Image: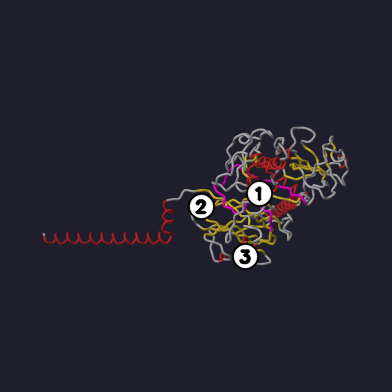
């Protein structure tokens, strides 16, 4: 007995001694500090150096971020076609299965880059569903040369599943993004780098421009890491402290501007700029995207609790996911600070007109943890069947208020929402409003929701259901059973009659 007691005490002590370190370890993981130095090149998550053509640094920096994420995801290294991305972003071409405007490199009889390109367009426009191809399929050509002939389609080698934003002055968030998603797109100011050693130390490849205000961004690059202990004395002008970002530039092969350091205190890292990272997919998870927003979405509304969108199915399809755009959680719609939220996504048959979802039953429900602000894709675990011509709607409810992205026909956007198609609920109102009707000065304004769908084969049973409905199928089954019952009854009576007749004949004999 004593041995059993002693053994039990020893086991208890061992259990406690093991459990306590485990708890401490878990707490340490939650409070894990960011590394003082981090460089994506050392992880093999930076694509090769590129030479930009013309004033198209924004394209090359954005592509560098997309390529880096593909490497983080394990898809391998891509040399993506910057000019194809530029064509899509400047054209904002139509939805899937629609004809693509103009052809090749030409838009409105001009090569697209001569018309201009808005930096805000690249990531949002690619969320419309355009596949990105490799450069061998859509090559860069020298400025002044005749553009080669290529075919433009929606299929690609890589697809953008999401992009996430941070304020340029939020260094911790940017570092977390780089570790999670790879290289980050950032706008910078470099006009004086080449003109004065005061701002750029060519020996250490280090840049620092003191914040003076009134500047405009004139370049874009990819952030690929940082060094908290990078000496402030490595810069031409000494900044207030140590520390620098590592950037991959777009000016050519190895040389004095291939990779550089920019001081944490440089004027470009202010709240005027956004830092953007990408999330990619190497498979096309849809045949069609249902959407009303045109891909730019410059407007955010704070205090949002719910968004809803009506759609009509164009074919027999399986819904594979949705794209939503929570952009923050503060009362300031321009603040990208985000505390995270749980989004409950429900799909309903029918047409949303307000709070009718309270009395309807969803055909599909899922939840997603939203950790970062930006346009993002949530894939469904189960098949959600929709038939051609069906009205259906998506309802997204957040467990806390968020700043949500809206879009409208502004600045070349292809927004196309009509009254009765898009609804928003904000906390202070606690009631639904039609975004198109409410923002009459912002034409075709809509909440940014997209639905991904795959075409599917319809079974013979589903075809019958489509023709006569569930009620008709049930009635038909009941009718068939009734007929079968009647036939069986008649057969039994006939057999009984024949049997009785045989018995009577035997008796006569």
Q: Quadrant of residue 53?
A: top right
- State the quadrant of the C terminus: bottom left
Kindly indicate whether the residue at mark 1 contacts the one at mark 2 (C-beta within 8 angstroms): no
Q: Residue at x 56, y 64 (%)?
A: 353
Q: Disc 2 versus disc 1: distance between alpha carbons?
A: 24 Å
Q: Is residue 324 visible in this depiction of the protein?
A: yes
The mark nearer the N terminus, 3 or 1, is 1
Circle 2: is it few (<14), some (14-19), or many (20+) Cα within 10 Å? some
Q: Disc 3 versus disc 1: distance between alpha carbons?
A: 26 Å
- Asked if the stretch drawn in magenta spans residue 278, the answer is yes
Label 3 sits on residue: 432
Give residue 124's mark. 1
Circle 1: is it few (<14), some (14-19), or many (20+) Cα within 10 Å? many
Q: Which residues are magenta?
A: 272-300
- Total marks drawn? 3
Q: Quadrant of residue 441?
A: bottom right
- State the quadrant of the N terminus: bottom right
Q: Position of residue 48 (x, y in %)?
A: 70, 35
Q: Is residue 202 above or below residue 458?
A: above
Q: Is residue 502 above or below residue 90?
A: below
- Asked if the stretch drawn in magenta spans residue 468, the answer is no
The mark nearer the N terminus, 2 or 3, is 2
Q: Position of residue 243 (x, y in %)?
A: 83, 44
Label 2 sits on residue: 314
Q: Is residue 260 above or below residue 333?
A: above
């Amino acid at each position: 007995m004593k041995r059993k007691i002693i053994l039990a005490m020893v086991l208890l002590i061992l259990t406690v001694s093991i459990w306590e370190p485990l708890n401490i370890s878990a707490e340490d993981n939650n409070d894990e500090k960011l590394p003082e130095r981090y460089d994506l090149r050392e992880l093999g998550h930076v694509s090769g150096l590129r030479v930009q053509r013309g004033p198209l640094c924004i394209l090359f920096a954005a592509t560098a971020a997309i390529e880096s994420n593909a490497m983080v995801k394990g898809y391998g290294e891509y040399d993506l076609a910057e000019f194809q991305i530029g064509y899509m972003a400047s054209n904002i071409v139509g939805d899937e299965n629609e004809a693509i405007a103009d052809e090749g490199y030409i838009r409105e009889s001009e090569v697209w880059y001569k018309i201009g390109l808005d930096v805000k367009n690249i990531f949002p426009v690619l969320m419309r569903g355009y596949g990105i191809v490799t450069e061998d399929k859509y090559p860069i050509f020298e400025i002044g040369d005749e553009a080669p002939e290529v075919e433009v389609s929606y299929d690609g080698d890589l697809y953008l599943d999401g992009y996430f934003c941070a304020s340029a002055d939020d260094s911790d968030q940017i570092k977390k993004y780089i570790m999670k998603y790879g290289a980050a797109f950032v706008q910078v100011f470099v006009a004086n780098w080449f003109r004065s050693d005061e701002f750029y130390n060519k020996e250490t490849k280090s840049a620092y421009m003191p914040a003076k205000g009134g500047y405009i961004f004139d370049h874009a690059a990819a952030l690929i890491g940082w060094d908290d202990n990078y000496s402030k004395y490595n810069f031409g002008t000494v900044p207030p402290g140590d520390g620098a970002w590592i950037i991959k530039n777009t000016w050519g092969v190895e040389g004095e501007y291939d990779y550089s350091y920019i001081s944490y205190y440089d004027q470009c890292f202010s709240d005027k700029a956004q830092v953007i990272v990408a999330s990619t997919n190497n498979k096309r998870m849809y045949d069609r995207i249902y959407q009303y927003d045109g891909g730019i979405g410059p407007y955010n509304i704070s205090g949002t609790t719910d968004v809803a969108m009506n759609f009509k199915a164009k074919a027999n399809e399986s819904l594979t996911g949705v794209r939503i755009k929570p952009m923050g959680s503060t009362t300031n719609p321009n603040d990208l600070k985000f505390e995270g939220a749980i989004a409950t996504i429900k799909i309903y048959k029918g047409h949303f007109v307000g709070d009718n979802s309270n009395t309807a039953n969803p055909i599909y429900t899922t939840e997603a943890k939203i950790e970062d602000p930006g346009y993002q894709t949530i894939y469904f675990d189960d098949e959600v069947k929709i038939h051609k011509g069906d009205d259906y709607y998506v309802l997204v409810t957040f467990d806390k208020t968020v700043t949500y992205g809206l879009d409208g026909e502004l600045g070349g956007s292809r927004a196309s929402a009509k009254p009765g198609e898009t609804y928003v609920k904000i906390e202070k109102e606690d009631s639904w409003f039609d975004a198109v009707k409410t923002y009459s000065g912002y034409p075709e304004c809509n909440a940014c929701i997209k639905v991904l769908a795959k075409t599917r084969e319809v079974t013979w049973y589903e075809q019958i259901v489509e023709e006569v409905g569930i009620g008709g199928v049930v009635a038909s089954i009941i009718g068939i059973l009734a007929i079968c019952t009647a036939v069986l009854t008649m057969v039994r009576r006939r057999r009984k009659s024949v049997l009785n007749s045989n018995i009577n004949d035997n008796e006569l004999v």
